[in-house]
Amino acid sequence: MGAIFDAIQQKLTDAFAPTRLEIEDDSGRHAGHAGASPGGESHFNVTIESAAFAGAAKVARQRMVYRALAEELAGPLHALSVKALAPGEI
């Protein structure tokens, strides 16, 4: 994968010790749209499961993830879709 994918994976692993982490580079579906990078790695979908999200509301969970990826969101990462779950949630 690329540098942004690797940064997302490392930072989310370090911040949340996830029991499940799925990262999909969805940039190809956004080719030609605003913020799309010709080289990809501009749009990602993330599904993360971690005990760190237990008891937190959906918006709070997303904010936690955005905070962990603030550097990427301020630069090369244009869009991030997040599904943050506590263990046992679907």
Image (spheres, grey):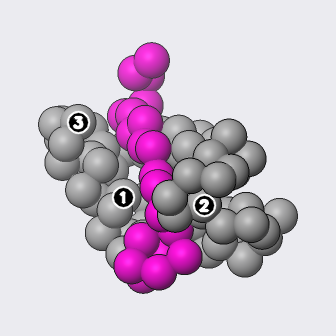
Q: Crowdedness of circle 1 by 10 Å Cα count: few (<14), some, many (20+)?
A: many
Helix, strand or loop status at disc 1: helix
Question: Which residue, given by chain and number where applicable, does mark 1 sit on?
Answer: 65
- The three-letter code of the residue at mark 1 reads Val
Q: Crowdedness of circle 3 by 10 Å Cα count: few (<14), some, many (20+)?
A: some
Task: Farthest residue to the front: give it.
Answer: 32
- The three-letter code of the residue at mark 3 reads Lys
Residue 19: x and y, percent? Answer: 56, 43
Task: Please tell me which of labels 2 and 3 falls first in the chain.
Answer: 2
* Side of 63 where 40 appears, left or right: right
What is the spatial separation of the Cα atoms under label 2 and label 1, in whole angstroms? Answer: 21 Å
Task: Farthest residue to the right: give it.
Answer: 1
Residue 88: x and y, percent? Answer: 43, 22
Q: Which mark is residue 58?
A: 3
Task: Please tell me which of labels 2 and 1 falls first in the chain.
Answer: 2
Q: Residue at x 68, y 51 (%)?
A: 31
Residue 79: x and y, percent? Answer: 46, 55
Does residue 48 appear in this view?
Answer: no
Residue 76, magenta (yes or no) = yes
Q: Which residues are magenta?
A: 71-90
20 or 63: nearer the viewer = 63
Task: Please tell me which of labels 1 and 3 falls first in the chain.
Answer: 3
Helix, strand or loop status at disc 2: loop
